[in-house]
């Protein structure tokens, strides 16, 4: 796979995760995050936090999260959105340049995130 930072990598992946969330404190204001970017979801602009500790996985990784909400079935529900991008680089990779490229991809993903108008989330509540 050819990665954004220009080297061939045996494995590069980006993962999107979503979970229901109870606490209403925005992610960047919680321990373990620093301000990263913003995302607009369901017409609301929300802060995105960059995880300050690298996830326990091999290679180089960048993880960011945001707390978003939506009204389903008449009640507001909060969701934690997590985007993790990682790569197992080959050879002499410039780690900081690689991490920067991964962060830019995660930033772009959050900045272009949008709610699915055909969601079935109401069926799971």
Image: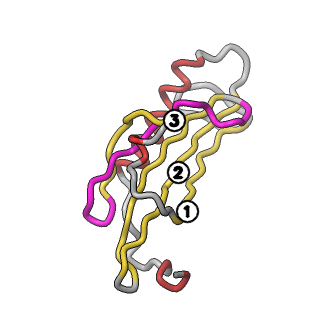
Looking at the picture, tell me which residue is in the foreground, 3 or 34.
34
Q: Earlier in the sequence, mark 2 or mark 3?
A: 3
SS type, badge 2: strand
Q: CA distance from mark 1 to mark 3?
A: 18 Å
Residue 28 found in image quarter = top left
Q: Residue at x 57, y 57 (%)?
A: 17
Looking at the picture, tell me which residue is in the foreground, 4 or 102.
102
- For label 1, the residue is 19
Which numbered dot is residue 32?
A: 3
Q: Position of residue 36 (x, y in %)?
A: 38, 36
Q: Which residues are magenta?
A: 41-58
User: Do the CB atoms of the residues marked 1 and 3 lie less than 8 Å apart?
Assistant: no
66 part of magenta stretch: no
Which numbered dot is residue 82?
A: 2
Q: Earlier in the sequence, mark 1 or mark 2?
A: 1
Q: CA distance from mark 2 to mark 3?
A: 14 Å
Between marks 1 and 3 in the image, the one whose residue lies nearer the viewer: 3
Q: Quadrant of the N terminus?
A: top right
User: Do the CB atoms of the residues marked 2 and 3 lie less than 8 Å apart?
Assistant: no
Between marks 1 and 2 in the image, the one whose residue lies nearer the viewer: 1
């Amino acid at each position: 796979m050819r990665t954004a930072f220009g080297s061939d990598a045996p494995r590069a992946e980006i993962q999107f995760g979503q979970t229901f969330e109870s606490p209403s404190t925005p992610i960047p204001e919680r321990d373990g995050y620093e301000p990263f970017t913003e995302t607009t979801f369901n017409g609301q602009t929300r802060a995105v936090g960059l995880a300050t500790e690298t996830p326990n996985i091999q290679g180089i990784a960048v993880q960011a999260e945001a707390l978003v909400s939506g009204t389903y079935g008449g009640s507001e529900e909060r969701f934690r959105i997590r985007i993790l991008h990682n790569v197992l680089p080959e050879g002499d990779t410039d780690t900081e340049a690689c991490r920067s490229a991964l962060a830019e991809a995660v930033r772009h993903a959050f900045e272009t995130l949008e709610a699915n108008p055909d969601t079935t989330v109401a069926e799971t509540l």
